[in-house]
């Protein structure tokens, strides 16, 4: 069997067309998930309050109605009173979209 240059070109074009068709089919059937701008918006800005030995820090007595938890080594946050019934959580990130890691063991200060 003799393979000519035309056969190679046809095989390359057919491979590219099959790949594009597969991606379009997966996207049409919902297997490729696209993020919306709404999924990337900032819901609330959080700040870190330093607690020192020199005195107490004044904080509000009202709850923020949010709870944080550790999952797969990262800090997630969700509403405490979820009216939709679904457990919706978001990954807590810093200003550069880097996830905040969490640990169940608190290291000693200065280490």
Image (cartoon, rainbow, N blue to C red):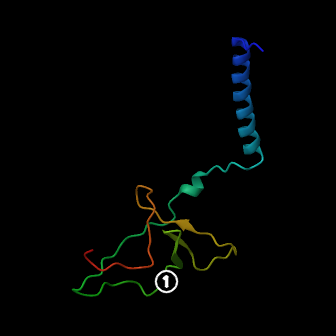
Q: Can you tell which quarter of the image residue 51 is in? A: bottom left
Whether residue 24 is situated above or below residue 61 in the rendered picture: above
Judge from the rendering whether residue 43 lies leftward or rightward of residue 8; answer left or right.
left
Q: Residue furthest left?
A: 54
Whether residue 83 is situated above or below residue 12 in the rendered picture: below
Q: Residue at x 71, y 39 (%)?
A: 23
Question: Residue at label 1?
Answer: 63
Judge from the rendering whether residue 97 lies leftward or rightward of residue 23; answer left or right.
left
Q: Can you tell which quarter of the image residue 101 is in? A: bottom left
Q: Measured from the top left, where is residue 108 in percent x and y?
A: 30, 80
Q: Residue at x 75, y 12 (%)?
A: 2
Circle count: 1
Q: Can you tell which quarter of the image residue 17 is in? A: top right
How many C-alpha atoms fall within 10 Å of the one at disc 1: few (<14), some, or many (≥20)? few
Judge from the rendering whether residue 33 lies leftward or rightward of residue 60; answer left or right.
right
Can you say which quadrant of the picture contains the C terminus?
A: bottom left
Q: Residue at x 33, y 85 (%)?
A: 58
Q: Measured from the top left, where is residue 84 in percent x and y?
A: 69, 73
Between 9 and 64, the one lying in front of the other is: 9
Q: Measured from the top left, where is residue 15 in percent x and y?
A: 71, 28
Q: Residue at x 43, y 88 (%)?
A: 61
Can you say which quadrant of the picture contains the N terminus?
A: top right
SS assignment at label 1 = loop
Judge from the rendering whether residue 19 lies leftward or rightward of residue 76; answer left or right.
right
Whether residue 55 is situated above or below residue 97 in the rendered picture: below
Between 90 and 15, the one lying in front of the other is: 15
Between 95 and 3, the one lying in front of the other is: 3
Whether residue 20 is situated above or below residue 39 in the rendered picture: above
Between 23 and 65, the one lying in front of the other is: 23
């Amino acid at each position: 069997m003799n393979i000519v240059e035309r056969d190679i070109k046809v095989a390359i074009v057919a491979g590219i067309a099959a790949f594009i068709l597969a991606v379009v089919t997966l996207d049409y059937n919902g297997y490729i998930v696209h993020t919306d701008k709404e999924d990337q918006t900032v819901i609330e800005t959080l700040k870190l309050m330093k607690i020192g030995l020199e005195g107490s820090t004044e904080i509000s007595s009202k709850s923020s109605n949010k709870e944080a938890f550790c999952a797969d080594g990262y800090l997630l946050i969700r509403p405490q009173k979820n009216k939709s019934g679904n457990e919706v959580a978001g990954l807590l990130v810093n200003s550069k979209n880097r996830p905040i890691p969490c640990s169940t063991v608190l290291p000693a200060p200065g280490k």
